[in-house]
Amino acid sequence: MKIVTDCAADMPNEELERLGIVQAPLFIQFPEGEVNAMEISADEFYNRLEAMRPQIPTTAQPSSGIFAELYRKLALTEKNIFSVHISSGLSGTINSARDGGEQVKAEANVSFWDTLTLSGGERFQVVAAALAHKAGWAMDKIQERLTKIREKTEVIYTLDTLEYLARGGRIGRVKALAGALLNLKPIIRVDIDGKYSTVKNERTINKSIAAIADHLAEKYGNTPVWVTVLHGRFAEKADLLSNEFKQKLNVAKMEVQRISPVLGVHTGPGIVGAAVVPMELMSDLGE
């Protein structure tokens, strides 16, 4: 079986290669042309983003044709494909994937999985699927585990500014203006329905960081957890959040990663947060 995902999963290239995962592109549309989000570094992207203010680029999911072509190519060596994608509540990517699968159903047997999350939370499910398949698990058992991971994972972040969410149409301008005037730093999580909800607002980024750690400590207690700290171009705040986690959570594994430019379009460089999953849901899969 081949596993396909999209670049909203924030998976490092070496991890994709090691696990044999194929990544469908998402696109960033700058005024001077479209860029494959997999082919631009985070720093190059944020330099371009800041240089074009007050304009903002847009993003585009892969077309059904791109998915069909990808599945067709994979089916030459492996007919069974498992396509695991960003939340349907945040993107139409999985709908494109399904349409692409429909086009090649005579050539490939494609199954689809809605992670109902994104970034590090999506990555946990993709990694689990790859490791479970490698360990010889049947598809129903893999999906059973992904369901548990989906239910128990928290993806949560805060933003230094609401400017990018407002300019990208992700929140209303009145709300953004009120937030800017009050200098609010919202704490946003991905809800069970795969959409964003606001946990609370704080007045400073440092207070938001402490509140994220408190929220996760309340959720997980002393359960050993795998923590992926994620940021745009906010390394010092990622370090601060990591230290909060070390004090407040039972961290079994922790890493710090950059979020994909395709997500950074809507947040700007000043984003910091985390994806967290109970270690027991990952540790029996190998590696």
Image (cartoon, rainbow, N blue to C red):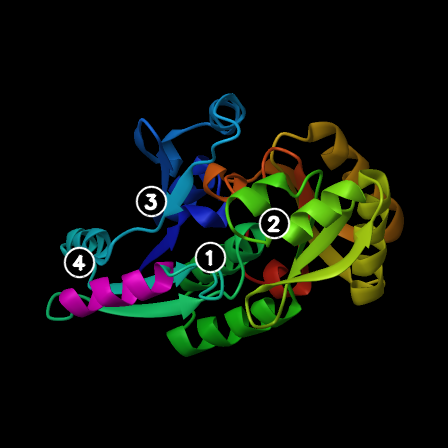
Q: Of the residues under marks 1 and 4, which one precedes in the sequence? A: 4
- In this picture, residue 121 sits left or right of residue 221: left
Residue 102 on the magenta span = yes
Q: Tell me where residue 271 appears, x and y as whole percent.
A: 65, 40
Give the CA separation, mark 2 to mark 1. Answer: 35 Å
- In this picture, residue 112 sits left or right of residue 220: left
Q: Of the residues under marks 2 and 1, which one precedes in the sequence? A: 1
Which stretch is magenta?
A: 93-103
Q: Of the residues under marks 3 and 4, which one precedes in the sequence? A: 3
Q: Find disc 2 in the rendering and name its residue.
A: 173
Identity of the residue furthest to the left in this view: 106
Residue at 40 percent across and 61 percent down: it is: 84
Residue 65 on the magenta span = no
Give the CA separation, mark 4 to mark 2. Answer: 46 Å
- In this picture, residue 202 sits left or right of residue 41: right
Which mark's residue is nearer the viewer, 1 or 3? 3
Report helix, strand or loop for mark 1: helix
Q: Quadrant of residue 35?
A: top left
Q: Find disc 4 in the rendering and name its residue.
A: 75
Q: Is residue 273 above or below residue 32?
A: below
Q: Tell me where residue 205 appears, x and y as whole percent.
A: 80, 40
Q: Find disc 1 in the rendering and name its residue.
A: 126
